[in-house]
Amino acid sequence: MKEEQTTLNPSGDETTPVELMESFQGRSLKSIVVFTLIIHALILIGTSVPFLIEKVAGKDNSELSEDERIELAVKKATSSLRDIADEHGLNVQDISNQFASGAKKPKAPAKDSAKKPTPPADPEKPKSTIEKELDVKADGPEIPKVEDDDDLFK
């Protein structure tokens, strides 16, 4: 069986399910679960480190004056604006000019259907017998009267 798999996979780069099972044979489920938990913990810690470093070692802006905080906010906004413009392939200057002038986003043109009157619907077709029966409103079945003396939830 082993020889058949190696002949089917001449490159040897890919692992087969049998090879994977061989690597886990003889190991307890406990060791596999511990290994999985360790890998997950490392990934979580690795992705959280940049955030934690910024929070712990980041600048304390509370001691800055108002002008310095505004300047810092403008720098952050400018870098974010550049990132957005690069992401969408737009000119940074055009976007910043729109913000500076307070221009609103251009409105979409009104729908043509609102300007043109809708053509009249087809003249009413004669209704089929089923449609006529559906339009007829008839009384439903009679509902039996429940006596007040009977308590149904006893």
Image: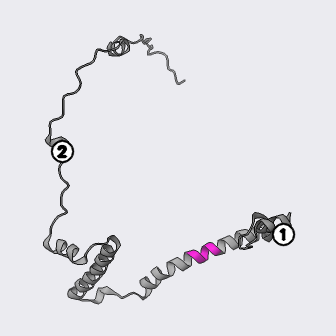
- Mark 1 closeness class: few <14, some 14–19, many ≥20 residues within 10 Å: few
Q: How is the image coloured?
A: one colour
Q: Disc 1 designates what residue?
A: 26
Magenta region includes residue 82: no
In the picture, measured across the screen, residue 81 lies left or right of residue 106, that is right
What segment is highlighted magenta in the picture?
A: 39-43
Q: Mark 1: which secondary structure? A: loop
Residue 45: horizontal and vertical position, in percent? 55, 78
Residue 94: horizontal and vertical position, in percent? 20, 74
Could you tell me what secondary structure mostly forms the magenta stretch?
helix
Q: Quadrant of the C terminus?
A: top right
> Image quadrant of residue 63?
bottom left
70 relative to 4, above or below: below
Residue 67: horizontal and vertical position, in percent? 20, 87
32 relative to 138, above or below: below
> Image quadrant of residue 100?
bottom left
Q: Amino acid at mark 2?
A: Asp
Question: Going 15% across and 67% down the picture, which residue do you hit?
Answer: 103
Residue 139: horizontal and vertical position, in percent? 36, 11
Q: Quadrant of the N terminus?
A: bottom right
Tell me whether the residue at label 2 lies in contact with that at label 1, contact meaning CB atoms closer than 8 angstroms: no
Tell me the number on the disc at residue 38: none
Dot 2 or dot 1: first in sequence order is: 1
Q: Disc 2 designates what residue?
A: 112
Question: Going 28% across and 76% down the picture, which residue do you hit?
Answer: 81
Question: In 3D space, how far apart are the residues under numbered discs 2 and 1 (Cα atoms)?
Answer: 72 Å
Q: Amino acid at mark 1?
A: Gly
Q: Mark 2: which secondary structure? A: helix
